[in-house]
Image: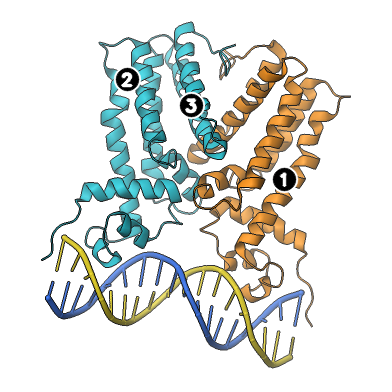
Chain colours: A orange, B cyan, C blue, D yellow
Amino acid sequence: MPVQKVTREEILQKAMRVFKRQGYHRTTMDDLARACGLLKGSFYHYFSSKEVLMKEVLRYVNDFNEKHVFAVAYEESLSPEERLGQLLDRLFRGVMTSEGGCLMGNTVLETSLVTTEFKEPLQQHFTNFTRAVGHIYESVFPAEKAFRLAEHLAIEIEGSIMLVRLGGHEYLMQDCRDRALERLRNGREPGPSGS
Amino acid sequence: MPVQKVTREEILQKAMRVFKRQGYHRTTMDDLARACGLLKGSFYHYFSSKEVLMKEVLRYVNDFNEKHVFAVAYEESLSPEERLGQLLDRLFRGVMTSEGGCLMGNTVLETSLVTTEFKEPLQQHFTNFTRAVGHIYESVFPAEKAFRLAEHLAIEIEGSIMLVRLGGHEYLMQDCRDRALERLRNGREPGPSGS
DNA sequence: GTCTATAAAACGATAGAC
DNA sequence: GTCTATCGTTTTATAGAC
């Protein structure tokens, strides 16, 4: 009796974790299948190739972030501080829950010079981020300056994730959040520790 | 007539470029051999495995940086501004010459949760960086603050490299340099565009 | 829908001729 | 020191029984 063990969406979630932890090239279809409680042969019933699966995973993550993370930037009933704080809390939860950091950042560095297959969803993620965060900063800064602050925050987040991954100084993520909020509050850009 | 086609050091340099561009797991021994003008079988005469080669490449990069990049931080005859500016110029040249960005950063994200084989040289790189940059900042800030500024600069550099890789906004590296020098000059931490 | 079995290709690594 | 040839393994992907 062939009972369905997983849904397509469950596979996307499990696969996301495996890709985040191991990277794209290091992950085998067998790894992905077993993470879903399936044997490799069964796994091909859902996804015809690793590349197709990865593209869907990236799209799934973008959809999730758009709905549950970046959306808060446009809830004008909240103050800019509340919106930025909540956005970062939700983003960091996704980044820090389960090992591996940021799937988008990892995949950029691992694949961008080897294939263009993933370029569009990867760029979309960072566009969505800077648009959302930039929108919040626009409540205090002119558009151009707000965009640059958002871009700079993306840089600090990705760089911090890398250093956390290397040495486990998890306070770096909190520092990121503190700086981002302080810039919003002060209308200027303080240093890493808010000196 | 078996004529020697490459030296060990030439292999390390070529391999560094290939690893930087393609990543560790995506790179095959055939890729590495051909990059050196050799066939796969010949390549094993120099290095017994891909892992051993990668470790030597990382050590080679660390040695090079120690001698030709970070060393300038301790040339007390130069002003702190000159030392920091030159250190970053040399570091960015290595990062931006030939595609792929920062081999150390790439390798952290690609391998740190899959194997511990490369952990030591990777940590060594970032330790060397923060020690060198921290030493420069100590000419203006107390030790603890100087270390945090150096750590924050490492974050900004690695994050910037990632965003450059994604979208080609190469001005982000110049911004990094400008911020680093401005913090040194001002005795405080300005924002991304020096507002 | 899941399984076993297997094909087909890619890859790391070795052996031996020159 | 470089080459050809090949071994053993891993991996992607497919076929067919249940």
The residue that label 1 is drawn on is: A62
Amino acid under disc 3: Met
Q: Residue furthest right?
A: A77
Q: Nearer the viewer, residue B177 or B2?
A: B2
Amino acid under disc 2: Ala
Q: Residue furthest top?
A: B186
The residue that label 3 is drawn on is: B173
Amino acid under disc 1: Asn
> Do the CB atoms of the residues marked 1 and 2 lie less than 8 Å apart?
no
Q: Establish if A97 lies above or below A158.
A: below
Real-space Cα separation, disc 1 to disc 2, in angstroms: 42 Å
Q: Residues within 10 Å of mark 3 (few under 14, many from 20)?
A: many
Tag shown at residue B73: 2
Q: Are marks 1 and 3 on the same chain?
A: no
Question: As drawn, is C8 to the left or to the right of A4?
Answer: left
Q: Establish if B48 lies above or below D17.
A: above
Q: Quadrant of the C terminus of chain B?
A: top right
Q: Quadrant of residue A10?
A: bottom right
Residue drawn 43% across the image and 41% down it:
B99
Q: Nearer the viewer, mark 2 or mark 3?
A: 3
Q: Position of residue A35 (x, y in %)?
A: 64, 63
Q: Quadrant of the N terminus of chain B?
A: bottom left
